[in-house]
Image (tube, grey):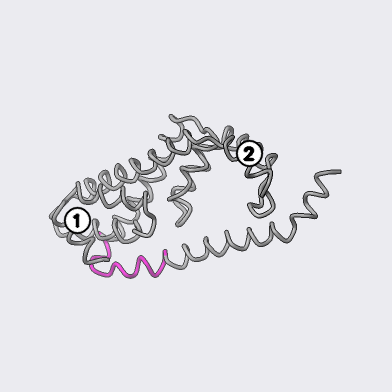
Amino acid sequence: MQDWVFQLVEGGGYAGVLFLMFLETMFPPIPSEVIMPIAGIVAASGALSLSGVIVAGTLGAMLGNTLWYLLALWIGIDRFQPLIERHGRWLTIDWPDVERAQAAFGRYGGLIVFFGRMIPSIRSVISIPAGLLRMRLPGFLIWSTIGTSIWSSGLAIAGWALGTHVDRIEEVIGPVSTAVVVAVVGLYIWRQITWSRRRSREGR
């Protein structure tokens, strides 16, 4: 994959970086942890500017982020209410949970999206709950752009500084991504185990 990304960045320039980051947002298996460091390496060679690849990467990611948000906003969480009420246990969520999440996004949505944009595995999907729970578009765009630009800048600068040793970045970020996935799975299992006890306590 790295060779293909190198070719597209070198051949397509800023448009190539934008396109790749758009794809990364829409199809997470194409990782930004590869795209932006490689863009930073190309910038270090003088073919592109570091600031240019950061702007292009941020813009490409934000195009995908906004599309996911608008799609989720159009669908709306209310369409899922029958599914949640019927299969809440396996989803580990019930409608009061949804209402609490809506309140959280209404009050802290900016911070949730901002930090979510900088957490591997979470950053690609945070647009969906933001849209479903009807976070306001201006706040979504502002905080998403800030978080995405920090993430893109960090990866591009790391690639620019490390040169061809891009594998070192993956050595750090890879375990973090794995830890996030393990934590999400562990939380799901815990909620399954405690579901009946929690529902009984809330029903009192």
Which is the main secondary structure of the residues drawn in magenta?
helix
Q: Nearer the viewer, mark 2 or mark 1?
A: 2
Where residue 52 appears, as percent x and y from the top left, is 21, 46
Q: CA distance from mark 2 to mark 1?
A: 44 Å
- Magenta residues span 160-173
The numbered dot on residue 48 is none
The answer to which quarter of the image holds residue 143 is: top left
Report the number of discs: 2
Where residue 167 appears, as percent x and y from the top left, is 32, 70
Quarter of the figure that contains the C terminus: top right
Labels 2 and 1 touching (C-beta < 8 A):
no
Quarter of the figure that contains the N terminus: bottom left
Residue on which disc 1 sits: 9
The answer to which quarter of the image holds residue 44 is: bottom left
Q: Residue at x 65, y 55 (%)?
A: 90
Residue 178 on the magenta span: no
Q: Secondary structure at mark 1?
A: helix
Residue 169 on the magenta span: yes
Residue on which disc 2 sits: 81
Q: Secondary structure at mark 2?
A: helix
Where residue 96 appears, as percent x and y from the top left, is 70, 39
Work out whether mark 2 precedes mark 1 in sequence or the reverse, and give the earlier one.
1
In the picture shown, does residue 39 fall above or below 2?
A: above
Q: Nearer the viewer, residue 95 or 1?
A: 95
Where residue 135 appears, as percent x and y from the top left, is 51, 33
Q: Residue furthest right?
A: 204
